Image (cartoon, helix red, strand yellow):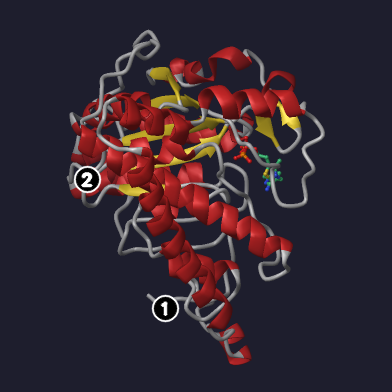
Amino acid sequence: MVSSKTAANKKPAKPAAAKKPKRALDQPPEFSPEQEMHAYRQMLLIRRFEEKAGQLYGMGVIGGFCHLYIGQEAVVVGMQMAIGEGDQIITSYRDHGHMLACEMDPKGVMAELTGRRGGYSKGKGGSMHMFSREKNFYGGHGIVAAQVPIGTGLAFSNYLKGTDRVSLTYFGEGATNQGQVYESFNMASLWSLPVVYVLENNRYAMGTSVTRAAAKSEELFNRGSVYGIPGEQVDGMDVRAVKEAADRAVAHCRAGKGPMILEMMTYRYRGHSMSDPAKYRSKEEVQKMRQEHDPIEQVRQRLIKSGAMTEDSLKSIDKEVRAIVAEAAEFAQVDPEPDPAELWTDILVEA
Ligand SMILES: Cc1ncc(C[n+]2csc(CCOP(=O)(O)OP(=O)(O)O)c2C)c(N)n1
């Protein structure tokens, strides 16, 4: 075990320079046709997967908690396009999209939702508690903001090991009011840890609007400023804007300049969880976001306009994606449930 004293001695503590928070560019750079296609396919996979999960939940095949990511797909896909082998990802309970973006197997994710042996936590974790060391996905956390110190710890480990790996630590705007976020900001800045705090501002924490819950809610990207952590507000519905901001934030971390906050302005179309009828906002508000800002539709329109794809070729991609999701759903229903004896396994790891 490495003591914090050793850690502090390894590199002299270098406080991050206090930078004036700035906003990202209004017009993001264009994607190549390959990047557009990649983003389209990944976002569509998440959307179709979540739609199927919602359906299975309605049928009673999935039980317990289930928080869908529909509407927010551009955030995780754009972030993922900016990182490389060995960079870590950690998030809250709204985690299926993050897992798919990390290329975890949709069958294993869906089977965990249905509580089957082939699930990523052997059917014992459910929607909020899945992990993959192989894909550098560190969960899946049900306690609001609990992943923020853990994600900061991942960055601390990168720092101690002297690697250039970066931790992407996601959390919601509701989590931004939790104390442990600021303890994390302090340490991340103190030791210049390579962590990008990806603040997914989908405007509601359960049924509470950000404007009712957060002081200075219009500038959450600025919440790290007293610690000298630079922050930016990003159009989280446009995958190109996300990728562009992510590239800069990741480069900032890799250059040893410490943490950065990206506030992703996004929106969730569905309720907080499956039991939320979402009566705290108007249907028109949701409709407007879907019609004018949908992250997948934006890419679809560009692909068609540029001539890179036709309606028919896009339909065939949709068919392929639906087949992957159908296969996952099938597996998640035929795979056996864990043996009751499994209740006593994987509880404690002896070091
Ligand atoms: C410490 C703690 N307090 C309260 C809850 C109940 N709770 C679950 S989700 C949630 C809202 C969090 O909203 P946000 O961070 O914005 O994330 P989102 O659900 O919008 O992705 C709350 C209050 C919890 N799980 N943990």
Nearer-the-camera pick, 81 or 58: 58
Instruction: In this rendered view, identify the residue nearer to me: 333 or 210.
Output: 333
- Residue drawn at 82 percent across, 34 percent down: 279
> In this orientation, which residue lies closer to the viewer: 308 or 110?
308
Give the residue type at disc 2: Gly
- Give the percent coordinates (x, y) of residue 297: 46, 32
The image quarter containing residue 15 is top left
Counting other residues with Cα less than 10 Å from the Cα at mark 2, is it few (<14), some (14-19), or many (20 or more)?
few
Can see residue 4?
Answer: no
The image quarter in which residue 179 lies? top right
CA–CA distance between discs 2 and 1? 31 Å
Q: Secondary structure at mark 2?
A: loop
Q: Quadrant of the N terminus?
A: bottom left
Query: In this rendering, is residue 16 above or below 103?
Result: above
Write down the residue under mark 2.
Answer: 84
As shown in the figure, which amino acid type bears the numbered disc 1? Glu
Taking the image as four quarters, which one is ligand 1 found in? top right
Q: Position of residue 281 (x, y in %)?
A: 76, 27
Q: How many marks overall? A: 2
Identify the residue under disc 1.
350
Judged left or right of residue 322, residue 280 is right
Residue 330: where, in percent of width, then height? Answer: 52, 74
**N-terminal label among 2 and 1:** 2
**Label 1 Cα crowd, 10 Å radius (few <14 / some 14-19 / many 20+):** few
Describe the element under mark 1 as helix, strand or loop. Answer: loop
User: Closest to the observer: 235 or 346?
Assistant: 235
Q: Is residue 109 above or below residue 267?
A: below
Residue 320: assigned label = none
